[in-house]
Amino acid sequence: MSGQPTYQPKNAIMKWIERRLPIGSLIYSSFVVYPTPRNLNYWWTFGGILTFLLMVQIVTGIVLAMHYTPHVDHAFNSVEHIMRDVNYGWLLRYVHANGASMFFLAAYIHMFRGMYYGSYKEPRELLWILGVILLLLMIVTGFMGYVLPWGQMSFWAATVITNLFSAIPGVGDAIVTWLWGGYAVGNPTLNRFYALHYLLPFVIAGVVGLHIWALHVVGQNNPTGIEPKSEQDTVPFTPYATIKDLFLMIVFCIVFAWFVFYMPNYLGHPDNYIPANPAVTPPHIVPEWYYLPFYAILRAIPDKLLGVLALVASIGILALLPWLDTSRVRSANYRPLYRQFFWIFVLVCIGLGWLGAKPAEGGYVIAARILTAYYFIHFLVILPLLGMFEKTKPLPNSISESILSPARAGTAS
Amino acid sequence: MLHKTLVAFLALALLAPLAPGFAADAPVPPRQKWSFSGPFGVYDQAQLQRGFKVYREVCATCHSLSLVSFRNLGQPGALGYTEAQVRQIASEYQVKDGPNEQGEMFERPGRPADRFPPAPRFPTGTPPDLSVIAKARTYERGFPWFVFDAITQYQEQGVDYMVAYLTGFEDAPPAGVTIPQGLYYNKYFPGFATSMPKPMQLYTNGVTYEDGTPTTPEQYAKDVAAFLMWAAEPHLVARKRIGFQVMVFLVVFAGLLYFTKKRVWSKVKVPA
C-alpha cells in the first residue's frame, strides 16, 4: 500500500548495512508497517502459530538427531536412550512427537479458515497452491518421521505406504524396490527416510518463505472477503497483529503443553513401543490421527490403484479449489448456503478421520464410501453449482463500514 | 441445518458400534487407582519397591528388562534406594563382561552402571522385554470415551490392562472357548489364548512382603504394574512437576498478553 512509512536507519552500523543489503527495510516493511485488515479475527493467527511450530520442530529435531541412530538394530533403543539418559531427552522427544500433531492441527485449522473465508480466490490462488504444496510436504515429512523410532507401527506404516506405489501399472514394483533400497523395508529404507526427514523441513521452510512472500504481495484476506480500500481499513502489523498473534500462540502452547507434559502418548499408538518385527503384523495398522481422513479415503475404494488415485486426488483437488469454487463472493459470512455446506464438509472430514481408525470391514466401509463420495462431491459438484445458484447477502462497501454498521454485515459463523 | 447435521453424525456414531466387526471379545479391564495418575501424580516408592520384588522373584525368570540400568533404581522420582542399596542390588546380579586378557568372556557381579542382565532364552520364542511394556499395551476405549480421556488425563490404560491380565488367568476356559495346545486361557487377553502360563507365585502368596501389605494376586499385579510403569517412564515425576510450572507460566503469560492486546487495540474499533 502506498504512503506507508519507510525504514530510516538511525545508527551508523545499520546505515552501513542498509546501503549494501536492505534487510532492515525488508523486515520493516514486512513485519512492522505492513498493513493488515483491522477486522481479522483469531482464526488469522494460525499462520504465525505454524511458523512458530516449524521452528520448534526444527530445533528439537536437530538436537534429537544428535542422539539418534538410524540403523534397524539401534533405532528403537537409541530413542529409548534419548528418553532415559539424555538430559531432558524425554522433553525434546515428546515436544517433537506432539509438535507434529500440533502442526497438523494448526494447519487444518488454517486451511479450514481459508476455505470458510474464500482466501484462495483471485488474486490468492498461488498463495493457496503453495499452501497445498506445504501440506503435501508436511504429510511426507511427518510420515518419514514416524518411521524413525522403528517400532511396530513405524515398520508397518512404512510397508503399507511404500507398497501403495506398487499399484502403478507396469513399473510399480520396480519403483517400490527403488524406494526401499532392497526387496523389503529394511536398513536402507530407514537410512534414506532419516536423511529425507532431516532435509524436508528445510524445504518446508523455503516454501513457507514463498508462501509469506506471496501473502505480502496480495495482502491478507479478511472476514468480509472484500479488499481494504483505504487506510481506515487496515492497521500496521506491529503492534496490532504481533501482539494478537503472540497472545493466541501462547494459548495454543497451553494445549500443546497439556499433551507434552500430561499425556504425551495419547496421540501416539502403543504398538510403536514394540520394536519393529517384520515377522509379526499388528492386528490393525493405523496411521497417526492426522492422516486418518486420507487413509479412510484410500481404504474406501476396493481397487488398489483406484484407492491410491483417490488418495492422491483428495489432496490434489485442493489445488484446484480456486477454480472449482465459482462464487464471486469470498467470505462464507455472506454466503448462507455455502456456510452450511462448509460445516457439513468439516464434519465429513472428521467422520472420515474416525472411520480411518476403524477396521475396514462391514458398516465402516459403507460409511467411508459415502463420506468419500461426499468429499469429492463437495468440490466437484456443490462448489461449482453453489456459485451459480446461491443468492448471496449484500456486501458492505468497505471493511470499516462492516465494523461501523454491522447490521448490514453477515453474522459470523 | 447445522444442528440437523450434528444429530445425523451423532446418530451415525452411536449406530456404528452395531456394525459387524465391532466384536467386543474381552471384558473391559477394571479401572485401578494409581498414585502416578493426574497432573500431580508421583510414584509410590514403597509400591515400586514391592513391584520390583515381584519382578525379580517372578517375572524375571522369563522376562528381561534390558533398557533399565541398576543406577536408575536410585534416581530421583524412582524407587528411593540409596547409592549403597543400589550398589548392593547390582552386586546380587551376575553380569557378562569381557573379553579379558585371555580373550574370554566372564561373569562378574553387577555394578550400578550395568543394565539388567538378559533373561534366559527359550526354544519356543523370547517372551517380551518389559522395559516399555506399560506403554506398549492398552485396550480399546472407543468413542466417546477417548475424547473425555484427553480432558481427564486418563492414560493408565496400559497398567490397568496389565493388572487385569495378571489376575485374569483361569484354569479352565469357559464353555465354547477352545485354547490351542501350549497356550493358556486369560479372560482379558485379546483372543483369550496367551502364551504365558499362569504365574503361580502371584496366586499362592509366592512373594513375601515385609511391610505388611496384603499378598493377594490383585496387590501383586498392581505393584508390579506400577514398577513397570516406572521402568517405561522413569522421568514421569519430573515431567509432571515441570509441566505444572510450565502451565502456570503459560497461563499467567497468556493473561498478561490478553490485557496487553486489549490495551494496544483499545483505540481501534473492531467487530463485536
Image: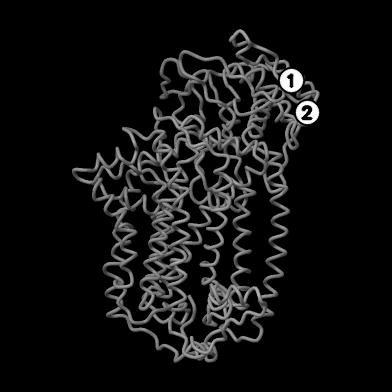
- Nearer to us in this view, B159 or B205: B159
Residue in the picture at 69% in, 40% down: B36
Which label sits on residue B81?
2
Q: Mark 1 highlights which residue?
A: B89
Using a 10 Å C-alpha cutoff, classify the residue at mark 1 as few (fewer than 14 neighbours), some (14 to 19) or many (20 or more): some
Residue in the picture at 54% in, 70% down: A45
Q: Position of residue B195 (x, y in %)?
A: 48, 21
Q: Amino acid at mark 1?
A: Ile
Using a 10 Å C-alpha cutoff, classify the residue at mark 2 as few (fewer than 14 neighbours), some (14 to 19) or many (20 or more): some
- The picture quadrant where one finds residue A158 is top left
Q: Chain of mark 2?
A: B
> Under tag 2, what secondary structure?
loop
Q: Position of residue B141 (x, y in %)?
A: 51, 44
Residue in the picture at 76% in, 24% down: B86
Residue A355 shown left or right of residue A46 in the figure: left
Do discs 1 and 2 share a chain? yes
Figure check: B268 above or below B219: below
Q: Are marks 1 and 2 in contact (CB under 8 Å)?
A: yes
Figure check: B64 above or below A308: above
Residue in the picture at 44% in, 55% down: A138
Q: Position of residue A321 (x, y in %)?
A: 33, 69
